[in-house]
Amino acid sequence: MKVLKFGGTSVGSAENMKRVSQIVEDEEPRFVVLSAVSGTTNDLVAICTCLYANDKEGARKIIEKFNFRYDELIEGLYDSEEYKIKGREHYSAFVDLLNGIVDSDFSEKEEKVVLAQGEVLSTKLFTTKLEEEGKDVMLLDSLEFMRLTSESEPDLEFSKLELDAILTRHSGVDLFIAQGYICRNSKGEIDNLQRGGSDYSASLLAEAIDASELQIWTDIDGMHYNDPRIVEHTKSIPKLSYEEAGELAYFGAKILHPYCLLPTRRKNIPVRVKNTMDPSAIGTYISEDTSEFGIKAVAAKDGIIVIKIKSTRMLLAYGFLKRIFEVFEKYETSVDVITTSEVAVSLTIDNGKSLNKIVDELEIYGEVHVEKDQCIISVVGNFIADEKGTASVIFDSLREIPLRMISFGGSKHNVTLLVNAKHKKEALNALNDSLFSNK
Ligand code: ADP
Ligand code: ASP
Ligand code: MG
């Protein structure tokens, strides 16, 4: 069975939903995972922000704004009045639930319920469209098989068991639809896999059912060798290894959720990134194949904080780094890039939630400096056969830009640099000119 995931733009209009309905027509059994209609989750987040501020009027106004968008979608999506009525019923249930939450007490629990509604609605609307077309389709509830452990990690064993039972029970069905992004937490409450998490849902599902392939259908023709939001005329990369694509996703290529490739890589399931608006474009094929050498792509991730701990006394003493990392572990904050010298260690984090507490504890070990608004630039490729050339080309192209940290050698797949966020655009363009101008 293949798993196909369609993102927000892919289900963002009647026209695009109809494209998706054609793409999922296939001989092979398919498991289709959908995001919310584009913009919906952002609006649901805005509703929650209003409700936390007790601004019920503000929340109601945002809910009202859904009307126009979904009216147009429902009118354009279904051919017959009978199915338009069904579509409107799905939409009314969505609005009624949101209005009910506006009128009651609001806490984190209700917030998670609100955030889940985008995917609940998009999957109902799409399934009803397929039913109108006479397709044999089954809508599943991801809350029944996607669950987080008490450590907030996906509970894969649970998903495997539940999905196995569901697929056995419905062995005659060839086309399943389910919501991306949403799950339950270990207390049984509704939760989610963080923004952009539908990619991760699809990949976890692919692992759980041992899929033959995962397809991520989006609004661009595959993974590009540079960030198309920042650099002009970028092109897609036909093939990448799991390591390369995983680094790009983790270090800022928004096209894939940072953890999306972990599950498929564990099971060696190939991933295709495809364009819903142009299905014939070849896209990007991601697999364990690492036979292509050289620099493949760059990505940038901003919102990075650098913490430098300076200690003339202790740095190289046995156990010093361990104690430092224990502070980050205690506050559940992961460290991305690290560089050391004889007297100092610099490291980066992207989550500043516990920054003050972390700094307070680190001050026991030395002088601590914090710099915000930094950006990680990651140059990704397969450098195994290229021991000499890689670094010099990269540094030469960035000679005008102050580099705050440099990390190379952690793997053969990336060179990681840290620059102030104000230099991000310049750095990505400079790297583009020197690395990809012949592409
Ligand atoms: P979806 O809603 O389908 O999940 P996203 O908006 O999350 O889509 O991801 C697709 C977007 O990712 C593209 O439109 C593009 O602007 C952005 N993007 C960032 N970096 C890259 C990259 N290296 N290659 C392709 N797209 C990228
Ligand atoms: N709808 C969610 C979001 O916008 C999840 C996703 O689209 O992947 O973040
Ligand atoms: Mg996405």
Image (cartoon, rainbow, N blue to C red):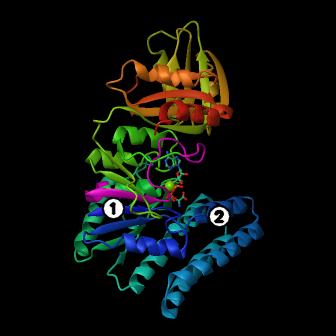
In the image shown, does 246 or 392 lie closer to the viewer? 392
User: As drawn, which residue projects farthest toward the top?
Assistant: 313
Secondary structure, magenta segment, majority class: loop
The residue positioned 49% from the left and 32% from the top of the image is: 435
Residue 194 image position (x, y, % from top left)? 52, 53
Circle 1 — which element? strand
As drawn, the label of residue 278 is none
Q: Is residue 264 visible?
A: yes
Q: Mark 1–mark 2 contact, CB under 8 Å?
A: no
Residue 10 image position (x, y, % from top left)? 49, 65
State left or right for residue 252 relative to residue 200.
right
Density class for disc 1 (Cα within 10 Å; few <14, some 14-19, many ≥20) is: many
The residue to which callout 1 is attached is 3
Q: Sequence order check: which comes first, mark 1 or mark 2?
A: 1
Q: What amino acid is found at the position of numbered circle 1 in the picture?
A: Val
The residue to which callout 2 is attached is 43
Q: What amino acid is found at the position of numbered circle 2 in the picture?
A: Asp
In the image shown, does 20 or 294 lie closer to the viewer? 294
State left or right for residue 352 relative to residue 282.
right
Q: Which residues, given as a range, are shown in magenta?
A: 207-233
The residue positioned 45% from the left and 64% from the top of the image is: 276
Q: Is residue 185 visible?
A: no
Relative vertical location of residue 42 with respect to residue 350 in this rendering, above or below: below
Which quadrant does the N terminus fall into?
A: bottom left
Q: CA distance from mark 1 to mark 2?
A: 28 Å
Residue 213 image position (x, y, % from top left)? 29, 56
Residue 114 image position (x, y, % from top left)? 58, 66
State left or right for residue 14 relative to residue 284.
right
